[in-house]
Image (cartoon, rainbow, N blue to C red):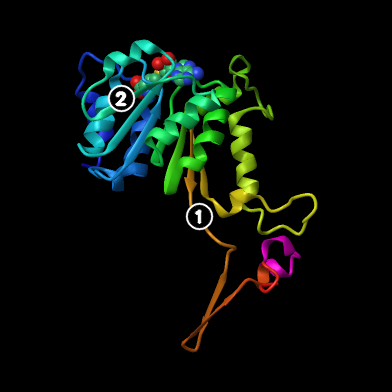
Amino acid sequence: MPNYFRDYFDRTDARAIYKMAHYLDLYDRLLGPWQGRPDIAFLEIGIFEGGSIGMWKGFFGSGAKLVFADIDPGCRRFDEPGIEIEIGDQADPGFLKALAEAHGPFDLIIDDGGHMMHQQKASFSHLWPHLKDGGLYVVEDSHTSYWPGFGGGFRNPASMIESAKDLVDRMHSWYTDEDDRFPLHPAASQVGSVQFHDSVIVIEKKLKEAPVLLVSKDGKTTRSRRMLEIRGRKSIFAPDEG
Ligand SMILES: C[S@@+](CC[C@H](N)C(=O)[O-])C[C@H]1O[C@@H](n2cnc3c(N)ncnc32)[C@H](O)[C@@H]1O
């Protein structure tokens, strides 16, 4: 079904669900290939009135590992067979560690929790290692990065948006001439893409080695890292590759 998320919103029930309208089309585009996949491990931070539980359950189908976390102990009332409810603070490293150890690694993590900068950044940094290769980390309502009351503000270096922009640089840290100022960052070998949608950040995990240029000519294909070597990125290469 190409419009699963939009259609789901027309089938309301007693549990309210909160999503900005344009997230629904984004999720249909982004997650379409994962619909009905029982092998998916999914985590959403932020339960509130429980409405999104049915949406994700219906999307992935029975058999998927579905985990929902919230700071409000009252959310335990949404406990039901086939899903896991965990109560804790998304900014607490101890809670995040226990959550990941109990249920990870995950294919898809959605942060729809408190939306404060310190919460989003703590959750991302502690849960990122527990995202699978090929998995997606989604930060909803990233417009709070522009709200001082949430720890953000325009170009505030403490905001989640600014951290995600840094990640764009780090993902490209293979390619610089400025070895001292811009050292190779581990994100270069872990981040496949950083997508900025209106109010949603999507970070794709892709484990990879230093990029290779392929040249194909006269029936022969050669591989080269010369593009990186000539920029003096010695730190990238093992001595025998230099
Ligand atoms: C926007 S609502 C979640 C809505 C739900 N995902 C939906 O789609 O309908 C935000 C939830 O985050 C929870 N929350 C706020 N601060 C949190 C924190 N520090 N850790 C975990 N959850 C938190 C709130 O209790 C609230 O239930």
Q: Which mark is residue 150?
A: none
Nearer to us in this view, 146 or 76: 76
Q: CA distance from mark 1 to mark 2?
A: 30 Å
Magenta residues span 228-237
Asked if disc 2 is less than 8 Å from ligand 1, the answer is yes
Q: Is residue 233 visible?
A: no
Query: Whole-percent x and y of residue 147?
Result: 59, 19
Residue drawn 50% across the image and 55% down it = 207
Q: Is residue 172 above or below residue 236?
A: above
Element on which disc 2 rests: helix
How many neighbours does mark 1 have within 10 angstroms: few (below 14), some (14-19), or many (20 or more)? Answer: some
- Circle 1 residue: 207
Residue drawn 57% across the image and 69% down it = 212
Nearer to us in this view, 231 or 77: 77
Based on the picture, tell me whether residue 229 belongs to the magenta stretch: yes
- Circle 2 residue: 52
- Residue type at mark 1 is Leu
How many neighbours does mark 2 have within 10 angstroms: few (below 14), some (14-19), or many (20 or more)? Answer: many
Question: Sequence order check: which comes first, mark 1 or mark 2?
Answer: 2
Position of residue 101 in the picture relative to residue 149 (left or right) = left
Element on which disc 1 rests: loop
Query: Whole-percent x and y of residue 211?
Result: 58, 64
Q: Quadrant of residue 234?
A: bottom right
Residue drawn 44% across the image and 34% down it = 100
- Which quarter of the rendering shows the N terminus? top left
- Residue type at mark 2 is Ser
Position of residue 19 in the picture relative to residue 213 (left or right) = left
